[in-house]
């Protein structure tokens, strides 16, 4: 019997950015949930992971990667973000956003090495064993920008002024083929080019983005975005507020099931407003 538990509960979480709430569901077909999500209020960190590997290894990978990245930031973020220009002639690294970007590369690398070491200990060959996607954002204290990061095909979207926009790029053979202009005989959508764990080295996508009050950010696994049409997600998020994030998450998960999604479903919504106060919080 699976010992899976969510790393963060389904209650509203107060971030410096606004209010965040996540939900996950095993879906209508799978016997276990290999997705997970984590929201850390003190760090301003929110992320989702979609594990793979079978025999409960997927749930170990997703939870392990999320926790490892979070732990790394807890240990190193304060010192790194306090640094100012040193003897390095590259003055751009004195900028807090650039320091945060560099720190996230290090944190993702740390999470990857941890899972890869576990795969080696289990005698799994390179490219095999357990692994996980990883997608999220970090709002470093005192910085106006968000740092977005992604490995694999979990996604981050932004709803702004009624328009839903994908902010991350899928690291898949399908996306690679589209960008190369391939029209016919496209590969399956879920064939990943990268994941956290199976290989000793990965190249995450990390960049910054300036949020605006009223933005709704949506992190999700492919159990949602692979099943529900873009326009329907946009309609659900169009009416989302801090007070209705739970209802929006529930509606999106229900839609994924209605559209016949066969995977675990995870969605994490953030309503951006640094002045919003949770009732009773």
Image (cartoon, rainbow, N blue to C red):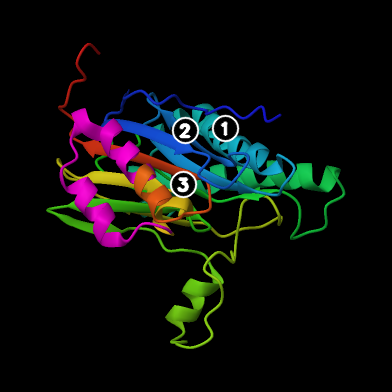
In contact (CB < 8 Å): disc 2 and disc 1: yes
**Which of the two discs, 3 and 1, sits closer to the camera?**
1
Task: Specify whether residue 14 is painted magenta.
Answer: no
Among the two numbered marks 3 and 2 on one chain, the one whose residue lies closer to the N terminus: 2
Q: Which residue is mark 3?
A: 87
Secondary structure state at the residue bearing disc 3: loop
Residue under the point 78% across and 47% down: 119
Q: Which residue is mark 1?
A: 67
Percent of width and height locating residue 229: 32, 61
In contact (CB < 8 Å): disc 3 and disc 1: no
* 72 over 135 or under it: above or below: above
For this view, does 77 lie left or right of residue 91? right
- Distance CA(mark 3)–CA(mark 2): 36 Å
Q: Closest to the observer: 106 or 251?
A: 251
**Tag of residue 38:** 2
Q: In the image, which residues are magenta?
A: 227-253
């Amino acid at each position: 019997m699976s010992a899976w538990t969510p790393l963060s509960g389904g209650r509203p979480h107060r971030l410096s950015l606004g209010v965040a709430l996540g939900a996950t569901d095993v879906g209508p077909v799978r016997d276990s949930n290999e997705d997970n999500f984590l929201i850390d209020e003190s760090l301003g960190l929110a992320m989702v992971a979609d594990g793979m590997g079978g025999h409960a290894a997927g749930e170990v990978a997703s939870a392990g990667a999320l926790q490892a990245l979070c732990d790394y930031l807890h240990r190193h973020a304060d010192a790194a973000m306090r640094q100012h220009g040193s003897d390095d002639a590259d003055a751009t690294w004195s900028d807090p956003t650039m320091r945060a970007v560099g720190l996230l590369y290090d944190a993702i690398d740390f999470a990857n090495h941890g899972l890869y070491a576990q795969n080696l200990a289990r005698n799994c060959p390179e490219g095999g064993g357990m692994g996980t996607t990883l997608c999220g954002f970090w709002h470093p204290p005192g910085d106006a920008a968000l740092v977005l990061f992604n490995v694999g095909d979990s996604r981050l979207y932004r709803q702004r002024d009624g328009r839903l926009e994908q902010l991350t790029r899928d690291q898949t053979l399908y996306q690679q083929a589209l960008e190369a202009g391939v029209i016919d005989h496209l590969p399956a959508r879920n064939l990943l080019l990268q994941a956290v764990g199976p290989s000793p080295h990965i190249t995450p996508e990390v960049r910054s983005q300036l949020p605006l009050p009223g933005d709704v950010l949506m992190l999700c696994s492919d159990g949602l975005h692979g099943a529900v049409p873009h326009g329907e997600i946009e309609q659900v998020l169009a009416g989302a507020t801090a007070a209705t994030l739970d209802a929006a998450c529930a509606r999106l998960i229900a839609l994924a099931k209605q559209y016949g999604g066969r995977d675990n479903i995870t969605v994490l919504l953030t309503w951006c407003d640094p002045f919003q106060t949770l009732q009773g919080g």
